[in-house]
Image (cartoon, grey):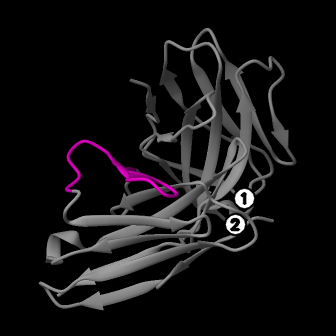
């Protein structure tokens, strides 16, 4: 089946540095990629939607300058957390739309120290 | 805006028994899709079942079935013959019936299965 490969699965970074998370669609072309943030035992909160070749659409309250999303090709979307701070520590998940369903990456646990 | 509500933060069930997880949603649209996703401790999101709103027949996938009540805007998930591997967080989700659509998730229900 269709797979979205998300890397890294976990990352620890120092406060003030930037971290890039990649999501690759392995055997299909992902025109649209959704990026979510999830806190422990809570639901997935949509951060932004990226479309190949155009600017991402951010949800209300999400800082676009902090969470940079790039969808330069039909198989790769990236989320860069810039100038990360401890409050950015969370679980980030990408998801690609496939027909009228979705396939999810395995997630990235970000810890900012 | 569409909203999805899961009123049961936690549920538990004995192995081999049946459990029902509740979900209600609010929408002004007549055509849409509803989903149940499972998130085990690995945190990988797994599709459990999907329902198209225009279909009156309730979707079924092996031990998983839904009770879709369109007028009541209710979409519950029934898990029969519960297994230890069913322990997970379950999310109900809604998506508009358009060529592009984001998922709106409920708050989630943590299901514990007791041996």
The answer to whether A89 is drawn above or below residue A47 in the figure is below
Who's the residue at 63% across and 27% down the image? B97
Who's the residue at 27% across and 73% down the image? A81
The label shown at residue B84 is: 2
Say which quarter of the image contains residue B79: top right
Who's the residue at 65% across and 14% down the image? B70
Q: Quick one: quadrant of the N terminus of chain A?
A: bottom right
The answer to whether A8 is drawn above or below residue A102 in the figure is below
Q: Earlier in the sequence, mark 1 or mark 2?
A: 1
Mark 1 lies on residue: B15
Q: Is residue A61 magenta?
A: yes
Badge 1 and badge 2 in a common chain: yes
- Mark 1 chain: B
Residue B88: where, in percent of width, then height? 57, 61
Say which quarter of the image contains residue A80: bottom left
Of residues B56 and B41, which is closer to you in this image? B56
Who's the residue at 69% across and 66% down the image? B84
- Mark 2 chain: B
Q: Magenta segment range?
A: A45-63
Of residues A12 and B84, which is closer to you in this image? A12
Q: Secondary structure at mark 1?
A: loop
Q: Are marks 1 and 2 in contact (CB under 8 Å)?
A: yes
Asked whether residue A51 is in view, the answer is yes
The label shown at residue A38 is: none
Q: Secondary structure at mark 2?
A: helix
Say which quarter of the image contains residue A103: bottom right
């Amino acid at each position: 089946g269709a797979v979205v490969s998300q890397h890294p699965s976990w990352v620890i970074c120092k406060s003030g540095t930037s971290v890039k998370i990649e999501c690759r669609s392995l055997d299909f072309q992902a025109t649209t990629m959704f990026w979510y943030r999830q806190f422990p035992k809570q639901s997935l909160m949509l951060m932004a939607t990226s479309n190949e070749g155009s600017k991402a659409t951010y949800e209300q309250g999400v800082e676009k300058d902090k969470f940079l999303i790039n969808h330069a090709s039909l198989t790769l979307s990236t989320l860069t957390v810039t100038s990360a701070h401890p409050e950015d520590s969370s679980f980030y998940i990408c998801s690609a739309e496939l027909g009228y369903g979705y396939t999810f990456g395995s997630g990235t646990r970000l810890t900012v120290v | 805006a569409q909203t999805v509500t899961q009123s049961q933060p936690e549920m538990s069930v004995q192995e081999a028994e049946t459990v029902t997880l509740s979900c209600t949603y609010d929408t002004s649209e007549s055509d849409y899709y509803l989903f149940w996703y499972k998130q085990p401790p690995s945190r990988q999101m797994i599709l459990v079942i999907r329902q198209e709103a225009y279909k009156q027949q309730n979707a079924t996938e092996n031990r998983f079935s839904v009770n879709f009540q369109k007028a009541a805007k209710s979409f519950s998930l029934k898990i029969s013959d519960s297994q230890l591997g069913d322990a997970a967080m379950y999310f109900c989700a809604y998506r508009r019936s358009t060529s592009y659509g984001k998922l709106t998730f409920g708050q989630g229900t943590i299901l514990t299965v007791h041996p």
